[in-house]
Amino acid sequence: MQLPFTTYDVFTDTPFAGNPLAIVFDADALTDAQMQTIAREFNLSETIFVRAAEYAQHAASVRIFTPTKELPFAGHPTIGCAIALAERNHAKDEPRDLLLVLEERVGPVRCGVILARDGASFAEFTAPKLSTQAGADPSIETAAKALGLSASDIGFDKHVPSLFSAGVPFAMIPVAGLDALGRAQLIDAKSSLTLGATEVFVYTRAQADAAHSFRARMFAPEIGIVEDPATGGAAAAFAGALARFEPLGEGWSTLPILQGVEMGRPSLIGLEVNIENGALAGARIAGKAVKISEGVLFL
């Protein structure tokens, strides 16, 4: 069996920045075990497998794997796959603004794509599930211990540690500033479990003159991701934390996140949050992606 694949750097318009993604096409015949093996072989934070859609009006059915497990939803595979399918299936002289739906385990995900004639294309999707609290708040002391920080490093303004999920649960740990963000590191692979989730999103407010609103890092060694350069699923979950802790007005707010700086792979994640009657009503994730490689898998 031979299967075509491509890799993209996602949440960036610059090659070798952002979050790398492997996309395997024509994957209908692969078993779960084969997909997990291939994801482990690529050894990227996620690999997405493209299969025939269940519904003819949808673009594809997809499965998303980390090196150690399957995920029901993830943001950077959604952005990268939407762009890859649009670039693969549409000629240069066709319309550049497209809508497509990916069938993910979490449900259908509606994506808008703007194809670039040169350079990086752009995609945006509506979060398929609203972010909700996923458990009791971790304590400040537990968060500090897990990340090798002091209690005074944890929290800012009204932000305290919390748990939120928009399909995948994340421990949301606010830190006092960029210095604390740079020093944060899970002390061992199991320490995330003390926070109530295998995936830990550490964030702080950006500097006043920055073009983004927050800086972040994401650690998930328990599922094979020591650190992730860009985590769209975390951004979707973060919408719930923002609705809880930030003084957001009614309507849509734009709150971009810069992630991956400490890894040398800066990634800009577009995040828009909608508040209606004081509660979270919607979230959109957006970003660019650029193709890096393509080839064939021999199975």
Image (cartoon, helix red, strand yellow):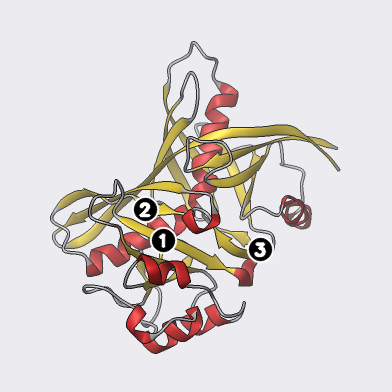
Compared across the picture, whether 34 is left or right of 141 comes to: right
Q: Which residue is disc 3 drawn over?
A: 69
Question: In the rendered image, which quarter is residue 276 located in?
Answer: bottom left
Q: Are marks 3 and 2 in contact (CB under 8 Å)?
A: no
What is the number of callouts on the image?
3
Q: Secondary structure at mark 1?
A: strand
Looking at the rendering, in which quadrant would you find the C terminus?
top right
- Say if mark 1 contacts mark 2, CB within 8 Å: yes
Residue 297 image offset from top left, x and y in percent: 80, 39
The residue tagged 2 is: 257
Q: Is residue 1 above or below residue 44?
A: above
* Between 188 and 109, the one nearer to me in the picture: 188
Examine the rendered structure and indicate whether residue 151 appears above or below residue 215.
below
Q: Could you say whether the residue bearing mark 2 is in a helix, strand or loop? A: strand
Amino acid under disc 2: Ile
**Which residue type does callout 3 highlight?**
Lys
Q: CA distance from mark 1 to mark 3?
A: 23 Å
Dot 2 alpha-carbon crowd within 10 angstroms: few under 14, some 14 to 19, many 20 or more: many
